[in-house]
């Protein structure tokens, strides 16, 4: 009986740790956005949002017209190629406060011809879709 309990514990733990994987959370998204552990922190809506990209500093900003919801991604280098690894500082708003994560390691998981970039941080389960303007 104890062995069955251990097996179930291992299975449930393993299932829980993979719950927010890159395919499930990030790669299915089409919108410019930031997600953490599967929850959308902000999604770009062209009718009520703005975005900017400072090419010289590799900074991406997305914010709503009221500047109540926003996120900023400052990359160590320009994210251009699938498989590229880089670090980034990320700041975003939540319903309660502002969160900042510095020096996160991201992998560029996908790019498209329109300049969209899908980046994933495995340790914090943060997915970001940004656009080179």
Image (cartoon, helix red, strand yellow):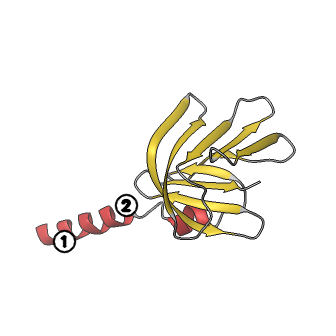
Q: Is residue 1 visible?
A: no
41 and 103: which is toward the camera: 103
Q: Position of residue 113 (x, y in %)?
A: 76, 70
Residue pictured at 12% horizontal, 67% vertical: 2
Picture disc at residue 17 = 2
Where's the C terminus, which quadrant? bottom right
Residue 35 to residue 22: above or below: above
| Residue where numbered disc 1 is placed | 4
Q: Is residue 102 visible?
A: yes
Per the image, label 2 sits on a secondary structure element best described as helix
Residue pictured at 76% horizontal, 44% vertical: 51
Quarter residue 93 falls in: top right
Where's the N terminus, which quadrant? bottom left
Picture disc at residue 61 = none
Q: Position of residue 114 (x, y in %)?
A: 78, 65
Residue pictured at 69% horizontal, 49% vertical: 55
Residue pictured at 56% horizontal, 59% vertical: 119
| Disc 1 to disc 2, C-alpha distance | 20 Å
Quarter residue 81 falls in: bottom right
Residue 109 to residue 125: above or below: below
Q: Position of residue 131 (x, y in %)?
A: 71, 56
Per the image, label 1 sits on a secondary structure element best described as helix
């Amino acid at each position: 009986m104890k062995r069955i309990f251990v097996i179930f514990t291992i299975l449930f733990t393993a299932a829980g740790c993979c719950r927010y994987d890159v395919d499930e959370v990030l790669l299915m998204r089409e919108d410019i956005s930031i997600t953490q552990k599967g929850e959308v922190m902000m999604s770009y809506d062209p009718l009520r949002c703005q975005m900017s990209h400072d090419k010289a500093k590799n900074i991406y900003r997305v914010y709503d017209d009221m500047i109540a919801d926003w996120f900023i991604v400052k990359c160590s280098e320009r994210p251009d190629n699938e498989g590229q690894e880089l670090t980034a500082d990320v700041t975003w708003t939540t319903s309660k406060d502002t969160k900042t994560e510095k020096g996160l390691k991201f992998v560029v998981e996908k790019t498209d011809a329109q300049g969209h970039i899908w980046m994933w941080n495995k340790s914090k389960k943060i997915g970001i879709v940004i656009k080179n303007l």
